[in-house]
Amino acid sequence: MKKMILTAAIFLGCIAYKQEAKAQISLSINIGSQPDWGPTGYDHVDYYYLPDVGAYYDVPAHQYVYYENNTWVRRTSLPSRYANYNLYNGYKVVVNERQPWLRDNVYRTKYASYRGRTGQTIIRDSRDVKYRDHWMANKQRQAYHKELQRDRKDARKDYKDYRKDVKQYNKDRRHGH
């Protein structure tokens, strides 16, 4: 009987330990999912609270969560009333909690003094090697935009040359050449 109780206790202990280990493992690193404007120093972020606009940013889903028409909505961008808000300068608070907007009054009160605050180091400006993928993505984006600008400049030049040739052709036709 004692052996059965001891065996059962060990078995239950192993199950509990395994469940705890699973919970710890499920907390993953999501540096690559964090936006360039996110603050540095966090290996895992579920949400950013944006005190300046009273909204949340869902990092894994790449969506903003904000209050609109008496309900919390999810959108890929902030509402037009915040068109001038600069995410790179505004302060962000990391919140690792499911549905933090359900306790919005807590966050709004706790971080009210953070409104208008700047000076937070962001991923885009960091030289920490863990943000290397962000650098590479930025360099690729910059190279693409430079190439696009060159192509547009070349296209404008080609179009101007074409228009010049058409004008000359029409002029020559009028004068019988």
Image (cartoon, rainbow, N blue to C red):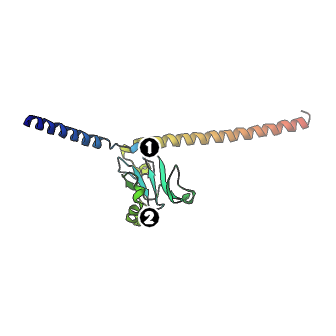
Query: Of the residues under marks 1 and 2, which one precedes in the sequence?
Result: 2
- Assess whether mark 2 and mark 1 are in contact (beta carbons under 8 angstroms): no
148 left or right of 66 in image: right
Q: Residue sitting at 38 percent across and 43 percent down?
A: 30
146 is higher (above) or lower (below) than 99: above
Question: Which tag is nearer the camera, tag 1 or tag 2?
Answer: 2
Residue at the front extreme of this rendering: 1
Q: Is residue 73 visible?
A: yes
Label ID, residue 59: none
Q: Residues within 10 Å of mark 1 (few under 14, many from 20)?
A: some
Q: Residue sitting at 48 percent across and 52 percent down?
A: 64
Q: Which residue is the site of mark 2? A: 115
Q: Which residue is the site of mark 1? A: 135
Residue type indicated by callout 1: Trp
Q: Of helix, strand and loop, which one carries label 1?
A: helix
Q: Nearer the viewer, residue 118 or 77?
A: 77
Q: Nearer the viewer, residue 127 or 22?
A: 22
Give coordinates of residue 150: x percent, y percent.
Answer: 61, 40
Q: Quadrant of the N terminus?
A: top left
Q: Is residue 86 visible?
A: no
Q: Of helix, strand and loop, which one carries label 2?
A: loop
Q: Residue sitting at 7 percent across and 37 percent down?
A: 2
Residue 100, image quadrant: bottom left
21 left or right of 88 in image: left
Residue at the left extreme of this rendering: 2
Residue 146, image quadrant: top right
162 is higher (above) or lower (below) than 72: above
Give coordinates of residue 169: x percent, y percent.
Answer: 84, 35
